[in-house]
Image (cartoon, grey):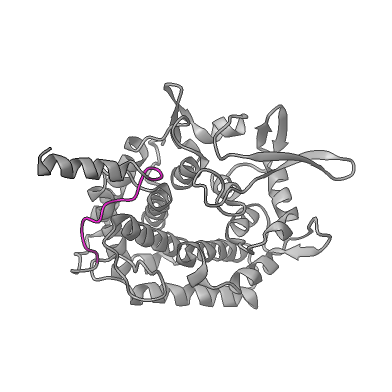
Amino acid sequence: MSLRAASFAVLALCLLTASCESPGPASEAAGTRESPIPDTATLVARIDDELAYTRDKRVLSLETNAAWQILHGVLAFGRDFTVEHQGRTIKVVDYLLQGGTLRGWDPELLTVGDPPRTTARLLLAPGTKSGQGHPDQWLAVLAQCDLPPEQPVRIGETEIPFRELIDQMLRDVHRNVDREYSWTLIAATWYYPTTHTWRASDGKEWSIERLVQIELEQELAESACGGTHRLIGLAMALDRRKRDGQPIDGVWREAREVIDRTARRARELQNADGSFSTDYFVRPAQHPDLKEHLGATGHTLEFLAVSQPPEVLAEPWVRRAANRLTHLFHVTRSVPLECGALYHAAHGLVLYRQRVAGTSPTDGQGT
């Protein structure tokens, strides 16, 4: 075998050995030179092009991929995200709501209340890269599809309103032994005001404000993806509180301060090419592996797009980051990428575009 043929064989083997598909190659150094800043119209056009490619050309299937990969795609592209199934294209959220099965989608029926009624919880499978990796992750993804509270969810022969799954999530908060309420906050505040309280199955009174306090007590640097999931949960809860006209005091003021302080830290550690530190908010860092590079910049932009006002997102440093991210999408088009990094980055671009341009990249196009 020639040296050239051997090199391609090794590369092909590397690309076939991981998740949705696999980590990207260590192909170009990050942070080595300052990137130009395109005007808004040019940047939006680039974002639209890369999102369209990611949505339409990186095709997932029920036969090949699991819930962990597919529901990350739903996070980025919403209820209309499509996958292949038995030779045809389907909307995967509708498929699941209608009782479809998917590896890693593991609902458990149970009976609660007096008179008794049937509800369900979605089981965890952390570390598998097929099932639910974080508590309440799937409910948070579905909530962001803006499902109506009374949307029927079929599990086997049983239909349950979506709100019942949210309420069971809240009854189960004491079961969250890792005290990771990032996704719980997203799902809860999508349907309930931040003043909401309830009695959990442990017999104790809980509140959304208590979940915020617990999240604030956790170390970002020791949390998944640099703590960006915690920050996004806090930011979305804070946004709900602001929209409801509630005071930003106590733990809510603390949440605002943590969010803004961390956003400033992201700017301080930003690389010259516009990418964000691959050590997130701890120290300057630039990783040669494009998967790490794309994951850190994508998660950080996602956090900024959720938490910062449009005037901040329009500043040159954020535009430079969004432009760098579109470049990373472009140069990895032919490379299978790990789904968590890929679709969180895509979600960051979707949210960024919505905030700076006021429209969705898929308005009028479907997904």
Q: Number of numbered discs present?
A: 0
Side of 138 relative to 6 (left or right): right
Residue 173 x %, y %: 71, 58
Q: Quadrant of residue 322?
A: bottom left
Image quarter of the C terminus: top left
Main SS, magenta residues? loop
Residue 344 x %, y %: 42, 53
The magenta region covers 18-30
- Taking depth in this image into account, of 298 and 306 the one nearest to the observer is 298
Q: Residue at x 24, y 64 (%)?
A: 30
Residue 206 x %, y %: 76, 64
Side of 219 relative to 35 (left or right): right
Q: Quadrant of residue 99?
A: top right
Q: Is residue 52 magenta?
A: no
Residue 118 x %, y %: 78, 38
Q: Residue at x 72, y 55 (%)?
A: 170
Q: Quadrant of residue 288?
A: bottom left
Q: Is residue 23 magenta?
A: yes
